Amino acid sequence: MAGARSKDNGRGVGIGMALGAGVGAAIGAATGEIAMWLAICLGLGIAFGASADARAKRADPPAHRPEP
């Protein structure tokens, strides 16, 4: 199937969201600004996770693509 997605797609984003939520909740509880820190850390976690997914995709090209 040409449009099928691999099970590994999006794993970095999920991990980034989970770590961002945990770190944001911890910092927010310590400072008393949970909403602000949760939003900041979730955003950063999603960004770093997407970056990790993109890097992994470039490092391991699909077998059907010819090497340049």
Image (cartoon, rainbow, N blue to C red):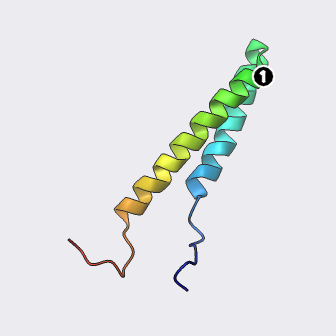
What residue appears at the point 32 percent right and 77 percent down from the top-left corner? Answer: 65
Q: Which image quadrant is residue 59 in?
A: bottom left
- How many marks do you count on the picture? 1
What residue appears at the point 41 percent right and 54 percent down from the top-left corner? Answer: 55
Q: Which image quadrant is residue 24 in?
A: top right
Farthest residue in the front direction?
Answer: 3
Farthest residue in the top direction?
Answer: 31
Compare residues 52 and 3 and report the one nearer the observer.
3
Farthest residue in the bottom direction?
Answer: 1
What residue appears at the point 36 percent right and 79 percent down from the top-left corner? Answer: 63
Location of mark 1 (residue): 34
- Residue 28 horizontal/vertical position (percent): 74, 21
What residue appears at the point 70 percent right and 22 percent down from the top-left corner? Answer: 27
Q: Is residue 57 above or below residue 16?
A: below
Q: Would you call the spot at circle 1 few (<14 residues within 10 Å), some (14-19), or many (20 or more)?
A: some
- Residue 61 horizontal/vertical position (percent): 36, 69
Residue kind at label 1, given as amino acid type: Ile
